[in-house]
Image (cartoon, rainbow, N blue to C red):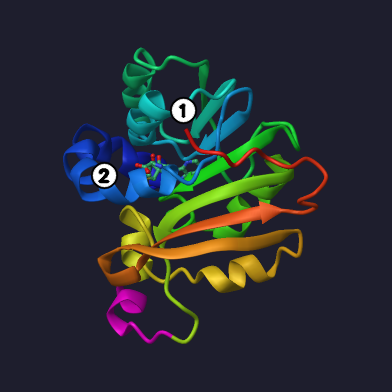
Amino acid sequence: MSLRQTYRLWAPMYDVFLKPATRSARAKNLAQLGRLDGLNLAVIGIGSGLDLDWLRLHARPAQCIGLDITRAMLNKAQIRRRDCPFPLHLIEGDAMQTPLASGQFDYVVLHLILAVVPNPAAVLAEASRLLRPGGQILIFDKFLHPQQKAPLRRFISPLLGLLATRTDVEFEPLLAAHSELTCVRDEPLLARGWFRGITLQKHPINQHPINHHKD
Ligand SMILES: C[S@@+](CC[C@H](N)C(=O)[O-])C[C@H]1O[C@@H](n2cnc3c(N)ncnc32)[C@H](O)[C@@H]1O
């Protein structure tokens, strides 16, 4: 069974479990976004659009693209789209190889997607490609540290990875492959730091600086 199929099964009950469990961590992470007026945002693996609940109350991007591989999840996001006060385009596609043009986004949001896909390195590379110089990638996900033993999470990961999400993904080796990205923030958000909020900035930071003032 593919992830697309499993998330089709998860779609009807996804919000019931994930909305309350991630609300505060999600809000805290999204609050890191600077002013979005006039800026372009991509939410990769947008799922049912839980991020939109926060974005529609706090942010006004010029344009937002939401991409996901599962039509049933996008259908849920489509319902939330009606309440969005900014242009939102929902696209069915693969986060590891998107149909989107390079360098067009000021921010790329990767919430609970890097640890889901079979090839997180491809998703991070794709996010970096989509980002313009000086832009930022905002990550919220669960990662092990390279030295962390976590035997149970490493043991069950192959099975869980087929059903919904991996539990053995390490962030540091992913980042090490990207000299064009600098980690400017890394903080524990949930489950005693297993879930982290991470901000990556694409070089050169001086070329097209983003306005980081908050409302
Ligand atoms: C755990 S959910 C996260 C959804 C949303 N980002 C959130 O924070 O609630 C993972 C999402 O990734 C999507 N997904 C899985 N593999 C994908 C892929 N290769 N490309 C795009 N989306 C994918 C699933 O359909 C699902 O909607």
111 or 206, nearer to the observer: 206
Q: CA distance from mark 2 to mark 1?
A: 17 Å
Q: Is mark 1 within 8 Å of ligand 1?
A: no
Q: Residue at label 1?
A: 59
Query: Chief secondary structure of the magenta span?
Result: helix
Instruction: Say whether residue 154 is magenta.
Output: yes
Instruction: Identify the residue shown where x is 60% and y is 66%.
Output: 174
Occupied quadrant, residue 61: top right
Q: What is the magenta range?
A: 148-156
167 or 71, nearer to the observer: 167
Nearer the observer: mark 2 or 1; the answer is 1
Q: Residue at label 2?
A: 23
Crowding at dot 2, Cα within 10 Å, few <14 / some 14-19 / many 20+, comes out as: some
Residue 168 place in picture, x, y as percent: 41, 71
Instruction: Identify the residue shown where x is 36% and y is 48%.
Output: 28
Q: Is mark 2 within 8 Å of ligand 1?
A: no
